């Protein structure tokens, strides 16, 4: 390339980079604005002009949100539900994925197709019959009731099966020679080789469940059984028109998943690309 | 050998049983039930009488269903293609950055996607607040008259589409970045040696090699947006839900607010079939796209 051509390329490259950075800042601005508004006193929040930084920074709305609303109860519900769903989903999917990958049994093909097919089914269409089922089981307004319909993530089985398929056959043959049972092989050979996937999938399952809205919203009618994302939108009277306080509650609701993402950025992105069907 | 096979089957049964039990209980059974009650006049809870295809036949003359179908299609139009293109542009920009800077910038684009929908709702409800929202201050500065955006029929769907693209673009960006990284650097080096312009490089190399990912992102978006409910419900609070009706909202309203399980199920089945058809098309399309590689 000629020197002029090179310079021109560098110039446009620089423009694109600057545009990307500006875009990123604008993109994140609503988040910044939400957080910063929650740190302003109520009278500053409603001022008729834009102030990018609070004049009197205050954490009082967080104090009120924590102590004067039921957000701590909602937190407990969300943590219990998200942990329960994560553990049950990961364990059952791992066992099933292992069987599909390593064992020959009648119905294996059929089960695999069933799982692939269920990938296509919109769970939103099932809300009526989930509600009927959960009420028949007497589980409305319980953690178990919120959890049950969320336990199906066929994609996790698919990812596990693919990963177990990749483990070289020699490991399995050696273990079988040693007379190790299938459970021993799974937990001592296959699982340790796939810890990375297991943690990544666990983190995103936790995030998905924490964020779930529709089903937790339908299956709970009592304020004290709500999960955080449902609670902060349904109990408006707890906040009235206190904008800053409502935003403080929103920040508290988003904080656990935002932290999980920022701490485990790589794992989260890995698991999300995997579950979309792209091998990382 | 025979005993071995039998042992395998037994172990497999034990391993598969926990998943299969849950699967049959909360997936297969409700799906079968959904089809069944869509042919009855059942209320939300309890059985009803067989009415054949009545619930489906009534949809055609139900104005609210028409609004729901139309709005869902409109929403898909507003989000899927624009969302895919915006994500592609951002991914191309982000992919030029290196190391920690790239990770930090990607995080800024990705962070909204990780948040619960209700947090996204509260933030944007505040941004668009008619009295005190920052967008209204900006409109004032620009000399444009304020609009109560989420309370105005014409603005509702476009605004929810913008919020949705903002919320979910991070996911598509991530997939595009993975696709871009998979393109071997040597191809670009060869193009640079040939003095290929930036646009030619994109059109001849990046775009065709990225096509499978583009198809994937597009169809994932399409399926996701057909199932839109949360944002529409939240932003409609205190507004006009009947004007903003979408398919899942219709199911919710019929079943949970009007106690008409059968009629709601007919729409649930419609949505179900629609999504399955699109998914099958997606599968075929992805195979085609993959074949081009």
Image (tube, helix red, strand yellow):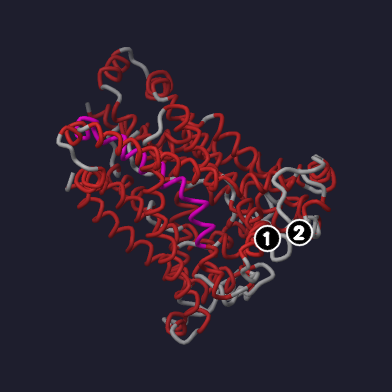
- State the image coordinates of residue B189 (x, y, percent, origin top left): 21, 31
Residue B293 drawn in magenta: no
Residue A48 badge: 2
Name which quarter of the figure residue A84 lies in.
top right
- State the image coordinates of residue B73 (x, y, percent, origin top left): 42, 70
Q: Quadrant of the N terminus of chain A?
A: top left
Asked whether the beta carbons under mark 2 and mark 1 sit within 8 Å of each other, the answer is yes
Q: Secondary structure at mark 1?
A: helix
Q: Is residue A112 above or below residue B30?
A: above
Q: Residues within 10 Å of mark 1 (few under 14, many from 20)?
A: many
Q: Which residues are magenta?
A: B161-188
Q: CA distance from mark 2 to mark 1?
A: 7 Å
Q: Is B137 on the left-hand or right-hand side of B277? A: right
Residue ranking furthest to the bottom? B61
Q: Is residue B262 above or below residue B11?
A: below
Residue A3 badge: none
Return the residue nearer the eye: A11 or A95: A11
Q: Is residue A227 above or below residue B15?
A: below
Residue B234 makes an appearance in the image? no
Question: Which residue was labeled with disc 1?
Answer: B137
């Amino acid at each position: 390339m000629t020197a002029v051509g090179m310079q021109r390329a560098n110039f446009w490259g620089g423009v694109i980079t600057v545009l990307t950075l500006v875009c990123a800042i604008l993109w994140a601005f609503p988040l910044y604005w939400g957080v910063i508004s929650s740190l302003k006193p109520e009278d500053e929040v409603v001022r008729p002009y834009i102030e990018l930084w609070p004049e009197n920074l205050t954490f009082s709305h967080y104090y009120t949100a924590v102590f004067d609303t039921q957000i701590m109860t909602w937190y407990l519900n969300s943590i219990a539900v998200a942990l329960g769903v994560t553990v049950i989903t990961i364990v059952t999917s791992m066992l099933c994925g292992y069987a599909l990958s390593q064992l020959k049994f009648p119905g294996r093909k059929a089960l695999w197709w069933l799982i692939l097919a269920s990938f296509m089914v919109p769970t939103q269409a099932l809300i009526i019959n989930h509600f009927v089922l959960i009420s028949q089981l007497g589980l409305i307004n319980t953690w178990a009731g919120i959890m049950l319909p969320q336990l199906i993530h066929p994609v996790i089985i698919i990812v596990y099966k693919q990963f177990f398929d990749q483990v070289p056959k020699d490991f399995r043959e050696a273990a079988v020679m040693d007379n190790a049972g299938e459970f021993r092989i799974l937990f001592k050979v296959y699982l340790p080789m796939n810890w990375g996937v297991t943690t990544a999938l666990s983190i995103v399952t936790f995030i998905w469940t924490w964020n779930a809205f529709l089903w937790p919203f339908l299956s709970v009618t009592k304020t004290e059984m709500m999960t955080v994302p449902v609670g902060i939108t349904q109990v408006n009277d707890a906040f009235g028109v206190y904008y800053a306080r409502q935003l403080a509650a929103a920040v508290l609701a988003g904080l656990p998943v935002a932290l999980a993402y920022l701490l485990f950025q790589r794992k989260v992105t890995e698991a999300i690309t995997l579950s979309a069907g792209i091998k990382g | 050998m025979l005993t071995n096979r039998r042992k395998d089957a037994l172990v497999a049964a034990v391993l598969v049983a926990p998943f299969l039990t849950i699967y049959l209980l909360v997936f297969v059974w409700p799906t079968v039930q959904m089809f069944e009650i869509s042919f009855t006049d059942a209320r939300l809870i309890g059985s009803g009488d067989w009415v054949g295809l009545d619930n489906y036949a009534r949809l055609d003359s139900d104005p609210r269903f028409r609004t729901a179908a139309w709005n869902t299609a409109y929403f898909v139009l507003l989000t899927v293609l624009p969302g895919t293109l915006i994500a592609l542009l951002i991914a191309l920009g982000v992919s030029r950055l290196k190391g920690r800077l790239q990770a930090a910038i990607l995080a800024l684009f990705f962070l909204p996607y990780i948040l619960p929908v209700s947090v996204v709702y509260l933030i944007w409800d505040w941004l668009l607040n008619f009295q005190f929202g920052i967008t209204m201050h900006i409109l004032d500065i620009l000399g444009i008259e304020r609009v109560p955006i989420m309370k105005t029929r014409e603005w509702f769907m476009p605004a929810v589409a913008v919020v949705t693209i903002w919320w979910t673009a991070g996911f598509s960006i991530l997939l595009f970045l993975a696709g871009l990284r998979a393109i071997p650097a040597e191809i670009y080096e060869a193009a640079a040696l040939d003095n290929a312009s930036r646009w030619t490089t994109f059109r001849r190399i990046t775009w065709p090699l990225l096509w499978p990912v583009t198809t994937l992102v597009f169809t994932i978006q399409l399926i996701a947006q057909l199932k839109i409910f949360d944002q529409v419900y939240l932003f409609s609070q205190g507004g006009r839900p009947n004007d903003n009706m979408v398919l899942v909202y219709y199911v919710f309203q019929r079943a949970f607010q009007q106690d008409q399980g059968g009629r709601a199920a007919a729409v649930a089945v419609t949505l179900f079939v629609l999504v399955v058809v699109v998914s099958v098309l997606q599968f075929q399309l992805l195979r085609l796209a993959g074949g081009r590689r």
